[in-house]
Image (tube, rainbow, N blue to C red):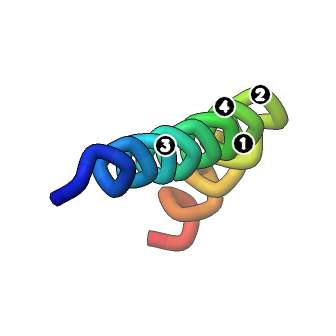
Amino acid sequence: MSTSAIVMMLVAMAVIWGGLTLAVVSLLRHGAVEDRAGDLRRDL
């Protein structure tokens, strides 16, 4: 693989993982995950 392809692949992976991390942090900050966990336990 060429150097530019490797660099583009690394940048794309950084963007994807960064977006995933921000999404998880946002969900945790707003308490959406905790609310759903409580609902799941109650339904079972």
Nearer the observer, 8 or 34: 8
Where does residue 3 sit, x and y in percent of width and height?
28, 45
Q: Report the Cα–Cα distance between label 1 and label 3.
A: 24 Å
Where does residue 42 sit, x and y in percent of width and height?
56, 61
The reply to whether discs 4 and 2 touch (Cβ–Cβ < 8 Å) is: yes
Q: Report the Cα–Cα distance between label 1 and label 4.
A: 5 Å
The 10 Å Cα crowd at callout 3, few under 14, some 14 to 19, many 20 or more, is: few
In this figure, which residue is indicated by the disc labeled 3? 11
Q: Amino acid at mark 1?
A: Leu
Q: Nearer the viewer, mark 3 or mark 2?
A: 3
The reply to whether discs 1 and 2 touch (Cβ–Cβ < 8 Å) is: yes
In this figure, which residue is indicated by the disc labeled 1? 27
The reply to whether discs 1 and 4 touch (Cβ–Cβ < 8 Å) is: yes
In this figure, which residue is indicated by the disc labeled 2? 29
Nearer the observer, 3 or 14: 3
Q: For numbered disc 1, what is the local secondary structure? A: helix
